[in-house]
Image (spheres, grey):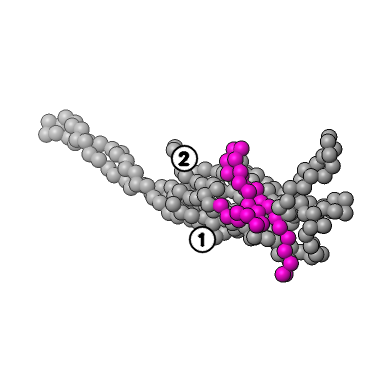
Amino acid sequence: MRKLMSMILILFISLSLSAQTYQHIKLGEDGKVFLDDKKAQADLILDMSKLISYDIGFSSTNVIDFSSNPTVSSSFSLPVTLRNDSYLSGSMTIYFYWKVISNQSLSFDIKIDNSMMNGEKTIPWRVVVQRGAGSSSTLKTGGTTSLENFASYKLPTGKLGDVGARSITIYMGNETIKVGSGDNAETFVGIDLAKTDVYIGTYTGNITVTVNVE
């Protein structure tokens, strides 16, 4: 199943509890009181259906814990800068997140289009995907465009669920460009207009995350 926006599923479970609530009082022939232990059973149903949930999607803001309110969207606009009439650059960071309460384990795969498209016209792009603390992988035009199991969910011991997020940084172009020299040198990812034809218009690229139930 492939999702580009948040997903909520509801499952149902119930728990049965027993209660022993009284003793039966019995009088003997001599008028003495004898306690004859008896049991009263009551079946109590604890409905957990509203707790089992899957909230998975893309957000422009990070998700830290269950109290975080992600700014969910399925469409983002990449800002573009024309530098020195020679280079185009643009980048932004979004987040893939999950807020899950479930016994089921999940894994997430990610894939990008090979290029951003404007009709039949194309421009290259680069997407850096966080895989963990201090770890990332790069997807880009003309290179690797998919990544399996870049993140996963598993029910933590002693908890009902867990929250997680991975940053996804998107760059226009897939070429690392160096401008200047010495202390004034600057390195960035962009497009050299002398090497790449770029036309006025709207370019779009798709990022797809597939959710796998383990």
User: In this orientation, which residue lies closer to the viewer: 208 or 138?
Assistant: 138
Q: Which mark is residue 156?
A: 2
Q: Position of residue 169 (x, y in %)?
A: 68, 48
**For residue 163, what is the image quadrant?**
top right
Does the segment drawn in magenta span residue 137? yes
Q: What secondary structure is found at the residue carrying circle 1? A: loop
Number of other residues with Cα within 10 Å of mark 1, as a class: few under 14, some 14 to 19, many 20 or more? few
Q: Amino acid at mark 2?
A: Pro
The residue at the point 45 percent across, 48 percent down is 105
Front label number (2 vs 1): 1
User: In this orientation, which residue lies closer to the viewer: 189 or 163?
Assistant: 189
The residue at the point 52 percent across, 49 percent down is 149
Does the segment drawn in magenta span residue 160? no
First-in-chain label (2 vs 1): 1
Q: Which mark is residue 1?
A: 1
The residue at the point 78 percent across, 51 percent down is 89
Number of other residues with Cα within 10 Å of mark 2, as a class: few under 14, some 14 to 19, many 20 or more? few
Q: Which mark is residue 41?
A: none
**Can you see residue 72?**
no
- Residue that extends furthest to the bottom in the rendered view of this protein: 120
Q: Position of residue 6 (x, y in %)?
A: 59, 55
Relative vertical location of residue 107 with respect to residue 123 in this rendering, above or below:
above
Q: In the figure, is residue 201 to the left or right of 129?
A: right
Question: Which SS type dominates the magenta stretch?
Answer: strand
The magenta region covers 119-147
Relative vertical location of residue 210 with respect to residue 178 in this rendering, above or below:
below
Q: In the figure, is residue 83 to the left or right of 47?
A: right
Q: Amino acid at mark 1?
A: Met
The residue at the point 46 percent across, 43 percent down is 155
